[in-house]
Amino acid sequence: MSIRALTAAAVVLTGALAGCGGEDPTSDDLGGAWTAALDVTTAWSEIAPRATGTADVSSVGSTSVRLAVTGLAAAAEYTAHVHDGGCDEDPPGGGHWLADPGGEDAAGNIIELSFTTSESGVGSATVSSDLVPDDRAKSVVVHAPEALAASEGADSDRVLCGDLEAD
């Protein structure tokens, strides 16, 4: 059996144990590496048609998320999160991925990045977290600031979404 297959089996087994009250979902046994190609959501396709980006997630004991985006509004403050749903869901990405699914949707239980775009609409961010994503982590979503979404008449603040694909 390959190392990749053994790692995948260990992640599945650990996830199953966590669901049965076994391992802690923030255990160091979880993790891996994923990439997400971020595409503009339907709600923003006419507002920011050239918006795109990438997210790289690496996790072994702790997590690093690197995000790079283009085609967004100039000099605006955005946030991005790891989400628990796919980009084809409504809303895209579902809810925030929570390290403790029974806990609050708040700092310390989510993986969040914040960044301000340049005058040309380019942005990037890197965050390190003690939280380790498990198999419930499905996507990365970039959220526009509320004021920008309102001024653009968007019915959602979800500008970009990318499904996490294992490296």
Image: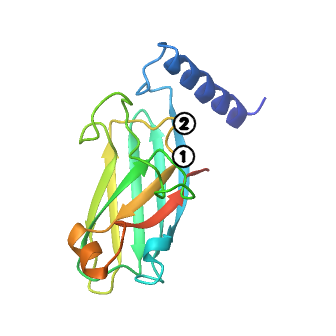
Q: Is 103 displayed left or right of 134 in the figure?
A: left
Q: List the residue tagged with mark 2.
A: 135
Provide the secondary structure element on which disc 2 rests: loop
| Residue 7 vertical position relative to residue 121 in the rendered view, above or below | above
Quadrant of residue 160 in the image? bottom left
Q: Amino acid at mark 1?
A: Ala
Q: Based on the displayed image, in which of its 4 quarters is residue 157 positioned?
A: bottom left
Q: Where is mark 1, residue-wise?
A: 33
State the image coordinates of residue 90 (x, y, percent, origin top left): 50, 56
Q: Of the numbered discs in the image, which one, if any, rests on residue 142?
A: none
Which residue occupies the foreground of this view, 49 or 43?
43
The amino acid on which the numbered mark 2 sits, given as a three-letter code, is: Asp
**Residue drawn 67% across and 27% down?**
9
Observer-nearest of 4 and 37: 37
Task: List the single residue furthest toward the right.
Answer: 1
Side (left or right) of 2 relative to 56: right
Give the residue drawn at x 48%, y 83%.
50
**Viewer-side residue, 47 vs 11:** 47
114, above or below 5, in the image = below
Q: Residue 57, relative to residue 122: is it above or below?
A: above
Q: Position of residue 111 (x, y in %)?
A: 34, 46
The reply to whether dot 1 and dot 2 touch (C-beta < 8 Å) is no
